[in-house]
Amino acid sequence: EGDASLFVPKEGVADLVTFSYSLSMMRDPFTAIDKMFSYLNQEAGVVGVADFYVSSKFDFPHRQMTYFNRFLWKSIFDFDNIELGPERRQYLDHRLVRVFEYNSSGTVPYVPFFKAPYYTWVGVPPTDANVDRAEAEAKRSRPMTFPPTFIYSVNWEDPIVDAPILKIGPEDVVLTLTSGGCNTLHLAAHGAKHVASVDLNPAQSALCELKVQAIKRLAYEDVWKMFGEGKHERVAELFETKLAPWLSQGSLNFWSKKLHYFQDGLYYHGAMGKVLLGVYWFQILFGYRKKFLKFCSAKTLEEQRSIWTSLWFVRIFLHMPAMVFAVMQYILTAIFLNKAVCWLGLGVPPRQYNLIGSDGRGMCEYAGATLHGAFMNTLVSKDNYFYRVCLTGSFTKDSCPEYLKESCFKKLKDGLVDNISVHTDYFGSVLNMRKYTKVILMDHVDWLNDELVEELATNLERQVVPGGRIIWRSASLNPPYTKVFERHGFEAHCVHRITDKDQNGCIDLVNMYASFWYADRKAK
């Protein structure tokens, strides 16, 4: 016990110094911080601070408060001679290098409804290695048209089909959309020099960040339980002790409220998860649960086909007269596959929905062809993990994304996962950050209007190096924007279409798109 501005430890040096709700109570906190700096180990020392706060008028995004909140909390704490001014933390930022920060609010004992603002902050002494201070994290809000969670819990594009087209090598700098994050990890595992993963939905970034940090910090079996089985009985403990300190504030805020996802099944949450929950209850209510579990464990494709074609609704759709099918398609589309359901549950935006119609295809026929082609040509129990998780809510070690296989997990954990950067931003903003050798557009160009397509093509022309390659999928057999890419220095090729005879109605494990394309950047 003593005066912090005079205190020196008996050992003369300290590796860890903490200020627990104390800087705000000191009359002269700056002298205490300077004194701490005199005995802090300059090579390996760490400083941890937890305290109440108010922001300055113009502050970092995650610290920023309204005028009302600044005035309210400063006035309340003044009654107890507690000073919440922002200059204390600003001085910490000045003397040390911030490596972690979390801003939140917590309940006040015996005072209902009010939550006082607090922060935790970790810093280290500046050295030659860390002298470049990290930028403050931007605060990202979800677009109004997005649900308050992630849409996709897994990527809905087959990386196995992508691999021979992309031919990822150790010098490749890759840009991809995040989605569920599975394919981001797949690209890193295949040795890309850097993988920039971008999504406009902060919740998709939070999911990808959690997967990345879980691979870095947890044992394989823990990662398997969380993302293979979708459940972990110790997730709260693992999150608090091993994962939370390494997440961005946006992701930490998200997962602090969503850990229950791992208690009743990760893959039944998110927008896509609600659709899967509907599939689950369909199986229960109509007595098909056992049959679908048998379907998902079929050892041969012949056995799987036999089960699939024995289902009454499959037989009806395969053999009903064209006129009856047209009426049924109209009814089912209006109820289950309308634009609202397709966007909020399946991630199919209105513009892409219209592209399907422009090929003369109805949504009911499109969905039916997707499922029938996949189930007649790919084995769910061994290969098609996409539909395995849809029908059962979990993966198996025989049927799962590559990052969940132990051999791939080890490669990622040994360092390849460090080659990933996760961004919550517009695709074009991250595209313009650096030059790329490979760009994976997924199906998002289907979502864009003509003006945005032109802008994207212009940026790709500038940022993709000569000889570089872009790939994309489309719900259209002949996406109209292909010609725009060709005008901007790319030579486009269609890998395959769903209508190609040799594809037999199935172009990959997902089989959700009508065509798959790549384009090479021409030499200048």
Image (cartoon, grey):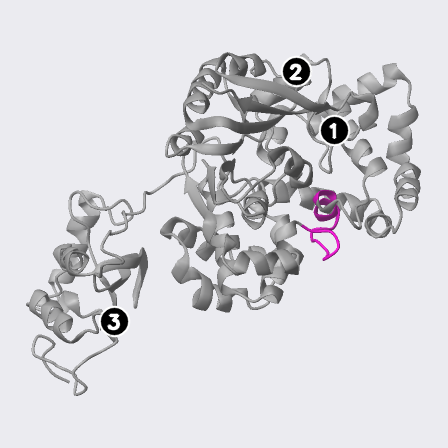
338 above or below 122?
A: above
Q: Type of residue at label 1?
A: Ala
CA distance separating discs 1 and 3: 58 Å
Q: Which mark is residue 367?
A: 1
- Residue at (57, 55) in percent of width and height: 261
State if disc 3 and disc 2 touch (CB < 8 Å).
no
Q: Type of residue at label 2?
A: Asn
Q: Is residue 276 magenta?
A: no
Which element type, helix, strand or loop, lies under badge 3?
loop
Please state the horizontal and vertical placement of residue 19, each as a whole percent of the image.
21, 71
Count of all numbered marks drawn on residues in the image: 3
Q: Which mark is residue 478?
A: 2
Q: Which mark is residue 45?
A: 3
Q: Report whether 102 appears left or right of 8.
A: right
Picture quarter with the N terminus: bottom left
State if disc 2 and disc 1 touch (CB < 8 Å).
no
308 above or below 247?
A: above
CA distance separating discs 2 and 3: 60 Å
Q: What crowding class fits label 3: few (fewer than 14 Cα within 10 Å), some (14-19), or many (20 or more)?
A: some
Please state the horizontal and vertical placement of residue 368, each as a whole percent of the image.
78, 29
Q: Is residue 113 visible?
A: no
Q: Report whether 300 appears left or right of 361.
A: right
Which element type, helix, strand or loop, lies under badge 1?
helix
Q: Disc 1 vs disc 2: which is toward the camera? A: 2
Q: Which residues are magenta?
A: 386-400
Q: What crowding class fits label 1: few (fewer than 14 Cα within 10 Å), some (14-19), or many (20 or more)?
A: some
Nearest to N terminus: mark 2 or mark 3: 3
Q: Report whether 117 appears left or right of 271.
A: left
Q: Report whether 487 appears left or right of 378.
A: left
Q: What crowding class fits label 2: few (fewer than 14 Cα within 10 Å), some (14-19), or many (20 or more)?
A: some
Q: Is residue 398 magenta?
A: yes
